[in-house]
Amino acid sequence: MAGEIVLHEAFRGLLTLEKAAEAAGVHPELVARFVEFGLVEPVCREEGILLFRPEAVPRLRTIYRLRQEMGLNLPGIALVLELREEIVRLRGELAWLRRGD
């Protein structure tokens, strides 16, 4: 197809900015802002092209929901995500300690 980007085999399975935004139901410009603010990390930033793992889509949805439904600003979203990741880490550590490994 004319104008379509063909990715190297190493990038198969990754999503372009536009595809990640579409999958998350978020405008691509907003995803780019999330990247600029450090809320989501692309796997690759080559020649103006951002590529994301499919696992970024739920994170994008969460960021969008925190912004739209809860009215949080980007620093607030960053804090919520950081705290959420810490809770997941601590729960894993607690489960490990309870098993007695």
Image (spheres, helix red, strand yellow):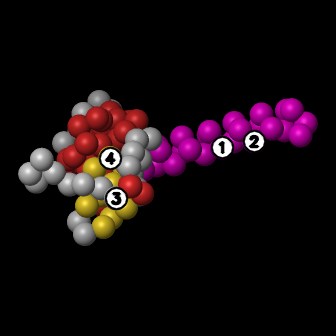
The residue wearing badge 1 is 89
Q: Which residues are magenta?
A: 72-101
Q: Amino acid at mark 2?
A: Glu
Q: Which of the two discs, 1 and 4, labels the residue nearer the N terminus?
A: 4
**Residue pictured at 39% horizontal, 45% vertical:** 13
Q: Residues within 10 Å of mark 1 (few under 14, many from 20)?
A: few
Front residue (pair 95, 42): 42
Instruction: Give the foreground label among 4 and 3.
Output: 3
Name the image quarter holding residue 65: top left
User: Circle 3 sits on which residue?
Assistant: 8
Q: Position of residue 63 (x, y in %)?
A: 35, 41
Circle 4 residue:
15
What's under tag 1, amino acid-wise?
A: Arg
For the residues labelled 3 and 2, say whether their Cβ atoms are less than 8 Å apart.
Answer: no
In terms of sequence position, does the residue under pointer 4 or pointer 3 come before the other?
3
Mark 2, residue position: 93
Tell me the crowding category of disc 2: few under 14, some 14 to 19, or many 20 or more residues within 10 angstroms, Cα based: few
Question: From the image, which quarter does the C terminus lie in?
Answer: top right
Foreground mark, 3 or 2? 3
